[in-house]
Image: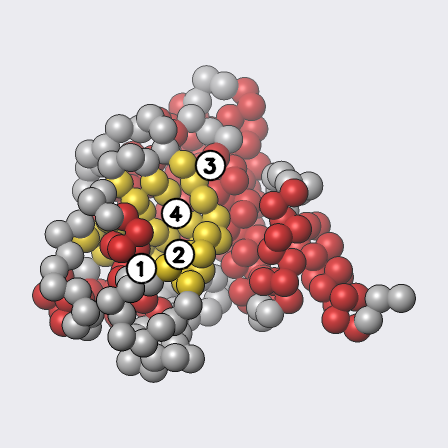
Amino acid sequence: MEDGTQTELKQIHEHFRDSLLIDKFDPQLEFWQKRRLEKTQSETSEDSIVWNVFRSFNQIDRKLWIEQLFYKAFQKEFSHSTEQIEIKLWKKIRQPQSLAVSEGKTDIDIIIESDTFVWFIEAKYKSDISLGHNDNTKRDELIRMIDGGTNYAKKRDFYFSLLILDKYNSPMGFRMVNEYKDSTEKVIGLLPHRQELPMLKCVSVFYWKDIQTLFKTVYLYSKNKYERYIADQASYWLYDKIREDN
């Protein structure tokens, strides 16, 4: 007989699966059951949005969305090849060994990467960033991800974005990104174990509504029926999600 924890885990997993638009029976979902058990309802909603949006992007030619997504996030032209771009969800990465206080691995919502760049995206829905860590209360969530991300990127260009519903649901994240995005010196000042961060190129905040409009653009310009179907499905689902929760 299943104990209470196993039963709750199964119910959460099935509820999460029911909220998915795409790849509902991907075997990778089994590995994330425990992760979702530890999440709040809002954070579980974040997981379903992340999955539906970025697994949809994964089914669409990169040339149709990566340049526009990058521009929406950074207001800059995408300067890398659109070939060999991978999307990874909920990957755990290590912090630099030079960090004085060990924090264990950091869970990254979305990693978009190739041989020349790494882009970390932290997704929030109706929640905000954490301002400390169990082992280090002086490092906010964004700093931990930038530190771990630049270490993960090695010599590749590194970009970081916070993806939110709006600044009212994620006020601290919105404020901290705006403090960091124009001051590499401030970021380095919060990372005393790092001498320089030449690979750190941009920090930004952008919105779920930006992605919803991008799916509409993909639908209009793709000549592939399957891609149009995927983009249309994701656009309408995300539009309803944004509208119902505002």
Earlier along the polypeptide chain: callout 4 or callout 2?
A: 2
For the question of whether residue 241 can be seen, the reply is no
Which residue is the site of mark 2? Answer: 93
For the question of whether residue 82 can be seen, the reply is yes
Q: Amino acid at mark 1?
A: Gly
Q: Quadrant of residue 148?
A: bottom left
Earlier along the polypeptide chain: callout 3 or callout 1?
A: 3
Give the Cα separation between the discs numbered 3 and 1: 25 Å
Q: Which residue extends farthest top?
A: 223
Give the Cα separation between the discs numbered 2 and 3: 23 Å
Q: Amino acid at mark 3?
A: Phe
Which residue is the site of mark 1? Answer: 148
Which of the labelled discs sits on residue 111, or is there none?
A: 4
Q: Residues within 10 Å of mark 2 (few under 14, many from 20)?
A: some
Earlier along the polypeptide chain: callout 3 or callout 4?
A: 3
The reply to whether the C-beta atoms of the residues labelled 2 and 1 are less than 8 Å apart is yes
Q: Is residue 99 above or below residue 236?
A: below
Residue 183 location (% of width, % of height): 12, 63
Q: Amino acid at mark 2?
A: Ile
